Image (cartoon, rainbow, N blue to C red):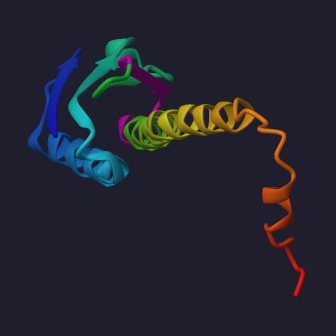
C-alpha cells in the first residue's frame, strides 16, 4: 500500500508524516491487499488566524471500486487525522464487503433460477422414493 502525504499552508514535519502513516496503516490494515494507493492532503485553511481550519483529506483507491474521498475538518490537526483515518477504514470495509458480497448474490440468483426452471416430468413414482425430512 502506497501512502503519499502532502501539506498546504504549513510545513510537513517528519512527526506529522510518521503519525499519518501509522494511523492509516492501522485503520486500513484489514484491506491492505485490496488498496492500490492512499493520498493524504493536509490543509490549514485560515493560516495563523486559528479556528476550525485544519483539514485532512484522504483519498483511497481500491481495486475494482471508485475512489473514496474522506474529508475531516477540526481545530486540531491530529484529531482531524484520527477521524479521517477511522472513517477511511470504515468506508473501505463497507466497500470491500459490497465487493465480496456481489458475486455470492449473483450466484444465489443463478441457483434459484435453475431450481425454478427444473421441468416437471410428471413421474410421481420417483417422488415417492424420496424420504421426507424428519421422517424415520
**Front residue of this view, candidates 47 and 57:** 57
Quadrant of the rendering where the N terminus is positioned: top left
Magenta span includes 77 = yes
Count of numbered circles in the view: 0
Which residue is found at the position 23% from the left and 52% from the top?
22
Magenta span includes 54 = no
Quadrant of the rendering where the C terminus is positioned: bottom right
Which residue is found at the position 14% from the left and 25% from the top?
11
**Front residue of this view, candidates 119 and 85:** 119
> Does residue 4 sit above or below 18 in this rendering?
above
Residue 18 falls left or right of residue 72: left
**Front residue of this view, candidates 19 and 32:** 32
Q: Position of residue 135 (x, y in %)?
A: 90, 81
Query: Which stretch did the figure color magenta?
Result: 66-78
Q: Position of residue 100 (x, y in %)?
A: 45, 40
Please identify the quarter of the rendering in which residue 114 is found: top right
Please identify the quarter of the rendering in which residue 67 is found: top left
Q: Position of residue 76 (x, y in %)?
A: 42, 36
> Does residue 54 sit above or below 95 in this rendering?
above
Amino acid at each position: 500500500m502506497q501512502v503519499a502525504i502532502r501539506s498546504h499552508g504549513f510545513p510537513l514535519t517528519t512527526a506529522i508524516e510518521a503519525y499519518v502513516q501509522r494511523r492509516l496503516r492501522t485503520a486500513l490494515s484489514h484491506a491492505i491487499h485490496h488498496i492500490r494507493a492512499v493520498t493524504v492532503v493536509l490543509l490549514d485553511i485560515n493560516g495563523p488566524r486559528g479556528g476550525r481550519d485544519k483539514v485532512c483529506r484522504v483519498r483511497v483507491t481500491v481495486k475494482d471500486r471508485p475512489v473514496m474521498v474522506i474529508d475531516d475538518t477540526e481545530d486540531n490537526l491530529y484529531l482531524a487525522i484520527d477521524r479521517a483515518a477511522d472513517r477511511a477504514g470504515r468506508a473501505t470495509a463497507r466497500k470491500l464487503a459490497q465487493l465480496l458480497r456481489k458475486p455470492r448474490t449473483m450466484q444465489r440468483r443463478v441457483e434459484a433460477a435453475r431450481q425454478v426452471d427444473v421441468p416437471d416430468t410428471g413421474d410421481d413414482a420417483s417422488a415417492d422414493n424420496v424420504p421426507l425430512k424428519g421422517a424415520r
